[in-house]
């Protein structure tokens, strides 16, 4: 969720409680520390390498893969430090570090 305000506030403007809460929620999300549960889900990833890699597009000096799907699934451990997430991808010839 992003805060989207069409116009700047001017002196004397009244701000609704909903708008004020949205401002504080956005500031809180921006300033907080990332936690393990923030990583769980499906992500889209672009990658590039200098190696000739099957399934990747040649761009002269490098190879690129666009919009590859990366899936992060939580383990049963309390944190990722105890046991890493399960990671899978649609990326051809991917090497996933653990």
Image: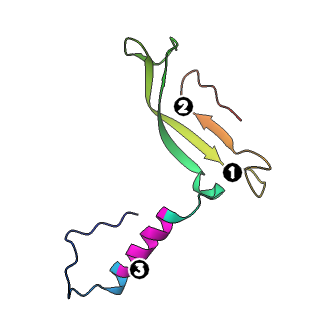
Q: Which mark is residue 21?
A: 3
SS type, badge 2:
loop
Observer-nearest residue: 41 or 95?
95
Q: Earlier along the polypeptide chain: callout 2 or callout 1? A: 1
Q: Is residue 55 located in the magenta-colored stretch of the structure?
A: no
State how far apart marks 3 and 2 are (Cα): 39 Å
Observer-nearest residue: 21 or 41?
21
Residue 55: x and y, percent? Answer: 48, 18
50 lies above or below 3: above
SS type, badge 1:
loop
For label 2, the crowd category at 10 Å Cα-Cα, with few meaning under 14, some 14 to 19 and many 20 or more, is few
Picture residue at 29% right of the left edge, 66% below the top: 4
Where does the C terminus fall, quadrant-wise? top right
Picture residue at 59% right of the left edge, 25% below the top: 94
Q: Which mark is residue 61?
A: none
Q: Which of label 3 and label 2 is nearer to you?
A: 3
Is most of the magenta stretch helix, strand or loop? Answer: helix
13 lies above or below 39: below
Q: Quadrant of residue 22?
A: bottom left
Q: In this view, does 40 lie to the left or right of 75?
A: left
Q: In which quarter of the image is residue 24?
A: bottom left
Residue 95: x and y, percent? Answer: 63, 25
Mark 3–mark 2 contact, CB under 8 Å? no
Residue 26: x and y, percent? Answer: 43, 68
Q: Which mark is residue 74?
A: 1
Q: Is residue 21 located in the magenta-colored stretch of the structure?
A: yes
Picture residue at 49% right of the left edge, 70% below the top: 28
- What residue would you read off at disc 2? 90
For label 1, the crowd category at 10 Å Cα-Cα, with few meaning under 14, some 14 to 19 and many 20 or more, is some
Residue 76: x and y, percent? Answer: 77, 54
SS type, badge 3:
helix
Please give the range of residues in magenta.
20-30
């Amino acid at each position: 969720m992003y805060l989207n305000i069409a116009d700047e506030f001017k002196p004397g403007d009244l701000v609704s409680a909903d708008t004020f809460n949205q401002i504080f929620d956005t500031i809180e999300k921006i300033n907080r520390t990332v936690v393990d549960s923030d990583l769980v889900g499906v992500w889209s990833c672009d990658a590039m390498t200098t190696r000739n890699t099957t399934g990747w597009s040649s761009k002269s000096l490098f190879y690129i893969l666009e919009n590859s799907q990366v899936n992060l699934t939580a383990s049963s451990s309390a944190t990722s430090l105890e046991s890493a997430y399960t990671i899978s991808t649609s990326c051809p010839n991917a090497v996933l570090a653990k």
